[in-house]
Structure formats: C-alpha cells, structure tokens
C-alpha cells in the first residue's frame, strides 16, 4: 500500500461527517460496508489489466466473473480487450481468492463476508464463498471511477459482511402476472443491492401461477393462461442461485384460496365458481375437516419441493377469516367435536397437520403473523406484516422472525421512512438472545396495482435504501448521504436492465401523444403516486383495471423532493444561486400547467389531473411572488400569507391520485417571505438579529 492507511469505520464516518478529508465521503457505495480504511493513491485499470480467480469454487462464479468483467468494460472501456490480450503468465491486477464454493443449496448460514484490498499496483478480493465473492464484485463496480483515460479504484482496505442473514424481496405475481423477463431483471437488481432471498408469491385468490403436473387444473382453469411452467420455475431458481439468491415460494393457505377452489372445489369449505375480479379478502378457505385436503397437500408440496430446493416453504396463512368454516354445517360440527370455538383454533389445527407434511419433504414452515400460535413448535419462521411489536412478541416467545410491515412499497413511503425503520429498533426491550431470533426483513411488493411496465419503478430505487438497512450496521442513519448514494446507484440499476427510469418516461410519452412531453415531465418531477388505499378508494381498482394513467407514469419519492428542500434552505440563508434555480423551477410550473390542462380536456386518461395541473400553476405563481418579497427583503402582507397557506392546505387533499412532494418546502418558503426585513428573510433574518 502506498503511503499510510487512514483508519475509519465507513458507516460511523458517513453518519457524523467525521470522515471529511479521508476520501471516504467521496465514495458512493450502497449498501455501506461494515468498515473501510482509506489509503493513499489509486489503482489504474488500463491496458495492462488482467483478472483471475484463485481457489476452490463452482462454475457459477466463473460466469459471475464474466458478467462482472462485461459490466466493468461497459463502465470503464478497454477491460475486455485488456483481459483478452493479457499474457498467460502476466501477474493479475485483480485477484479473486475464494476459500470454497459454499453450500450446494444456499442456506441461511451461508458466509457472505468478503474483504477487499486495493493498492496502487493491485487489488485483491478474498471471500469465504462464491456468494461473498459476488458481493465483493458488486462493491468493486461501485468503486470504479471513470476519470481521464480510464477507470481508477481508490486505495483502501474494506472488510464487509451483512448485519442480517435474511434480506428478502417479496413479489406478488398472482394479482397481476409478471413475465420471466421481469423476474430475471429483478434478480439482477437484487444482486446489486446484496439482497439474498426472492420470495415468490405464486398463488392467491386472483390467480394460480405455478404449473403442477399432478394437478393440472390449477393452470387450466385458475391462471387465465398466465403461469410459469416447471421448467421456467427451475430456470428462475438457477438464475437466482447464479447470483447468490435463494428462492422461497409462497402458496397461500388455508385462506386466499379462490384459485385453488375454482380448480379443485372438493377441497373447499364452500363452492367457488370463478376467481374474483376484485381485490380484498374473498370468502374462500380450504377444508381442514377433510382428510383428502391433507393428502392433496402432501402430493402438491412434494411436487413443488422438487422444484424449489430451499429449506423454507411459505404457506401464507394470513387473513383467514373462517366465515366459510362457520357456515358449513359439516365443518362446524367438526370444530365442535374437536373443541375449537374459534376459526383461529381450527387454523392452528390445520397448521399442525401441515407441519409434518412439510418436514416430510425437507421443508421448514414459514408464514405471516397469523401462524404464530402456541400450538406450533419453535422451529417455524414468522414474517410480520403487523409490525415490530408483533415481531418482538414472537422473539420473546422463542420464535424466529423477519420484519416486513414498514417495507410495504405500495404504501408509497419515502426511501427515508423505510431506511430508518429497523427490524431491531435502537430502543428495543429484547434481550441479546432474543434479538438473535430476528433474522432480518423483507421488502413487499403486492401486485394489485402493478404490471410488467410499472413494477420496476414501484420497487426501485427505494428498495436500495431498505437493502442497506438490512445489510449495513445499525448506526448507518445519515439520510442525506443515503440519498446522495441512492441517486448514483439508481443509474447503476439501469445498467443491469431495469426500466424504473425509462419505463415511466415511455408511459408519459404515450399519455402526451408526443415524443417530447415536456409539460408532463415537469409535473411528473414534483408529484408521486397516491397510496394503494387512496387509489383503491378513488378508482376501485381490480384485476381488469387499465394501469395506464398519470399515477402509473410517476415515481414514488422523486429526486425533486430533496432538491427543492435544499434549494429553499439555501435561499433562506441568502444563497443567490438557489434563488435562480427556484425561479426557473417555478416558471416551468407556470408554463406547464395550462398545457397539461389543455391535454387533460382531450384525453380521458389525463382527465383526473386537470385540478392538480391548475394547482401546479398556482404554486409556480406563489413561488415567484415569494421570491419577489425575499429579493427586496420586504415582509409579505398577512393576507397574502394566509391565502398561500390555505392553498397549500387545499393541495394536501386527494386529487388525481397524485401527491405533491414539495408542500412542506412551499410552507417554509411562504413563512420565509412573511418574516422578511432589512436583515434578510427566514434563517438569514433570524441570524441578522
């Protein structure tokens, strides 16, 4: 290593700003590694580049290494040619040292750690397993910086390992089917984010998406012809393994089973003639009083176990109301004989019967909160959609669990909100031993209001922030720096095939009927989608709803939220450049508003955004008037201030299934204009006094 090493913990330094001058603050790694020591100098990746793998490993690492070199070549240029032209006996510039391939079937105890050392002359990535090496290669790609004639890596020593062993992404493909292409690019993005579990929600009321050769009616009558063949499912399992990702299937039982009962009505508590078009919780439950139900499940789970090798099998188990059980005389009599006075007790019996079937096929039961009952042993896993209190209660009873409640993407929360939500909060009352039972968390993307053209922009890039929460130390809580790195990492996701940026732009062009939909672009930059529940109330979405409105063409938590906040803060501190930036922004709002209103009068798909467009123009006027008061350091009249505050309150109400992302900043701007005097406005005025 050239020169002295500067020892820092990257997470601690990024959080406190204490790394200034060390070089750490210039890195844009995501997720943040456990620790970094910055060195002096850098390694040039030029015409003499050569890379090699040393140590025992699987063929999958060779393929991953080739993908890494291809992406590095795209990023830096010249890498593929240099690797091709390098002499056989040339010393590698980059060496991957792997101790072993890891488990034949990747498990929860897989060693995912890696270490990276870069000097001015060489780089070495060492890992215990193939999976750790893959994580290290993702970090290397983020470190590569294109400057001058080629890429450079900063001199450093990096030691990294995940905080949590279970870092998942749940994708519901039942409500709206997602293509193989979507699944594969999702897995590619998960690898970038260092997520390691793909939770594949394959059945629910609205569709059964997995081919069963033993029970073909599932896909013949309960899939609308949209399903994955067994070969395709095996292909996804292999594709995921090649990227260090496990696949856990979910088949939701005993409730949410309309698709099961349309195909095989003899399994049900009631007759289901067709799959529901609407969403919600239809009355559809398997019959726990019928021995044929468990024989059927034994055969089905055995068949699926041959496709999905992971140790965990998700049975759903959520939202089983049991009304069909209570209304069925035969099942009601069965409950009476067994002493089950509530549907919850009958469901516990169902799970008790299911448990040995899963164990017979080498599977561990996993399910949502509702499976957590004293009747089941401690070797099941609970996924909490109810919250960290429910998760903690399970841990106190000795159950392993993961958290999902704060990470529901369809709630349209900001990256900040989900980034700060921790599976083990800093003020937890759990003992150290109980905390060990919380294995991590899963991001959840439900499928009611997404389809292949919009799924990427709903999942990414916000999932990067949650992935960092699962991977990085608990002390990593610097929101501003998280957003700085998120915007860079978001662009990197495009390089692995995601359409989270290009997809919404394509839909906006379609909505505008133009290759240059500038007005819609202006609006899209400062609005975000309404939540799942708000949209459902406004539009009553079902599986036949066309998802092609403006709400589908905008993204949650757009960059303008942070940009406008920074600009307003800088303005109120007297920054003239911020004033110019805001002026241009407000003028663009005024210009775009009438154009969008005109287009909304012509297009039914844009008709619901006319009022939001009008408000956007009003906010442009409001902003310019506030800037005028601030520029001349004259306090805005009380009547003007009250009128603007009323307009801001009005804009908080639901409209067009869109939400403005700048309302707190407009409130701050108006308040700043109200406090102007000769000493300045807002913060500047307060400082002058």
Image (cartoon, rainbow, N blue to C red):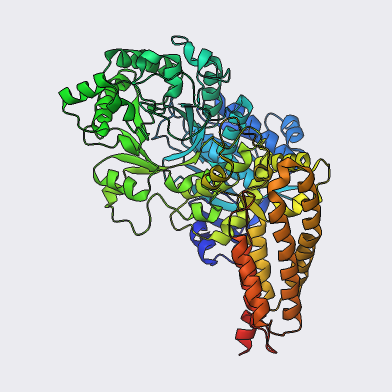
Left or right: residue 524 compared with residue 10: right
Near-viewer residue (153 or 275) = 275
Left or right: residue 82 compared with residue 425: right
Whether residue 669 appears in this view of the structure is: no
Whether residue 622 appears in this view of the structure is: yes
User: Residue at position x 69%, y 50% from top?
Assistant: 609
User: Residue at position x 28%, y 39% from top?
Assistant: 399
Near-viewer residue (140 or 395) = 395
Across and down, in percent, residue 57 comes to: 51, 27
- Residue 237 in the image: above or below residue 470: above
Across and down, in percent, residue 598 comes to: 80, 51
User: Residue at position x 67%, y 62% from top?
Assistant: 563
- Residue 477 in the image: above or below residue 579: above
* Outermost residue toward the right in this view: 515
Near-viewer residue (450 or 192) = 450
Image quadrant assignment for residue 578 = bottom right
- Residue 673 in the image: above or below residue 532: below
Image quadrant assignment for residue 662 = bottom right
Near-viewer residue (229 or 627) = 627
Across and down, in percent, residue 357 comes to: 30, 19
User: Residue at position x 35%, y 24% from top?
Assistant: 363
User: In what quadrant of the picture does the C terminus appear?
Assistant: bottom right
């Amino acid at each position: 290593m050239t020169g002295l090493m500067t020892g820092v913990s990257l997470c601690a330094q990024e959080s406190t700003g204490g790394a200034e001058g060390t070089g750490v603050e210039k890195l844009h790694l995501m997720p943040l590694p456990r620790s970094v020591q910055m060195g002096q100098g850098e390694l040039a990746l030029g015409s003499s580049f050569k890379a090699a793998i040393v140590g025992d490993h699987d063929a999958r690492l060779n393929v991953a290494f080739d993908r890494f070199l291809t992406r590095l070549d795209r990023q830096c240029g010249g890498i593929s040619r240099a690797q091709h032209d390098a002499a056989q006996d040339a010393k590698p510039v980059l060496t991957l040292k792997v101790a072993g391939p890891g488990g034949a079937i990747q498990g929860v105890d897989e060693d995912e750690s890696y270490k990276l050392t870069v000097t001015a002359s060489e780089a070495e990535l060492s890992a215990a397993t193939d999976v750790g090496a893959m994580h290290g290669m993702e970090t290397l790609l983020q470190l590569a910086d294109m400057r001058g004639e080629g890429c450079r890596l900063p001199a450093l020593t990096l030691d990294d390992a995940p905080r949590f062993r279970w870092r998942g992404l749940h994708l519901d493909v039942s409500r709206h089917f997602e293509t193989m292409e979507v699944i594969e690019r999702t897995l590619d993005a998960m690898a970038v984010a260092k997520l390691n579990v793909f939770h594949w929600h394959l059945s629910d009321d609205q569709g059964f998406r997995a081919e069963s050769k033993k029970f073909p009616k599932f896909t013949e009558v309960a899939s609308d012809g949209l399903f994955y063949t067994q070969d395709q499912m095996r292909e996804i399992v292999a594709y995921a393994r090649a990227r260090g990702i496990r696949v856990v299937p979910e088949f939701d039982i005993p409730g949410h089973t309309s698709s099961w009962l349309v195909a095989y009505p003899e399994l049900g508590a009631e007759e289901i003639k067709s799959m529901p078009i609407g969403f919600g919780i239809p009355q559809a439950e398997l019959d726990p009083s019928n021995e044929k139900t468990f024989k059927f499940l034994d055969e089905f789970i055995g068949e699926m176990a041959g496709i999905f090798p992971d140790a965990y099998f998700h049975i759903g188990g959520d939202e089983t109301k049991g009304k069909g059980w209570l209304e069925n005389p035969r099942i009601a009599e069965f409950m009476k004989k067994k002493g089950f006075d509530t549907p919850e007790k009958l469901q516990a019996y169902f799970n008790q019967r299911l448990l040995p079937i899963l164990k017979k096929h080498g599977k561990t039961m996993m399910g949502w909160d509702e499976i957590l009952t004293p009747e089941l042993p401690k070797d099941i896993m609970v996924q909490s959609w109810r919250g960290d209190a429910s998760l903690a209660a399970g841990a106190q009873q000795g159950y392993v669990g993961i958290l999902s409640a704060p990470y529901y993407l369809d709630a349209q929360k900001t990256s900040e909100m989900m980034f700060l939500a921790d599976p083990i909060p800093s003020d937890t009352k759990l003992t150290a031993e109980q905390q060990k039972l919380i294995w991590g968390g899963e991001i959840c993307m439900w499928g009611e209001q997404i389809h292949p053209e919009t799924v990427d922009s709903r999942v990414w890039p916000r999932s990067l922030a949650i992935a960092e929460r699962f991977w990085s130390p608990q002390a990593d809580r610097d929101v501003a720096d998280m957003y700085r790195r998120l915007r860079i990492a978001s662009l990197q996701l495009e390089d692995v095939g995601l359409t989270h940026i290009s997809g919404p732009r394509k839909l906006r062009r379609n909505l505008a009927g133009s290759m240059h939909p500038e007005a819609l672009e202006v609006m899209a930059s400062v609005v975000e989608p309404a939540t799942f529940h708000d949209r459902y109330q406004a539009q009553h979405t079902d599986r036949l709803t066309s998802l092609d409105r403006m709400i589908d063409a905008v993204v949650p938590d757009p960059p303008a939220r942070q940009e406008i906040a920074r600009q307003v803060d800088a303005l109120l501190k007297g920054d003239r450049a911020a004033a110019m930036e805001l002026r241009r922004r407000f003028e663009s709002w005024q210009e775009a508003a009438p154009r969008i209103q005109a287009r909304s009068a012509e297009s039914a798909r844009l008709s619901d955004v006319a009022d939001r467009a009008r408000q956007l123009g009003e906010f442009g006027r409001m902003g310019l008037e506030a800037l005028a008061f601030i520029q001349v350091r004259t306090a805005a009249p009380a009547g003007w201030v009250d009128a603007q505050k009323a307009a801001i309150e009005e804009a908080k109400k639901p409209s067009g299934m869109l939400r403005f992302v700048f309302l707190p900043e407009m409130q701050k701007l108006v308040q700043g204009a109200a406090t102007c005097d000769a000493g300045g406005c807002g913060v500047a005025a307060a400082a002058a006094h």
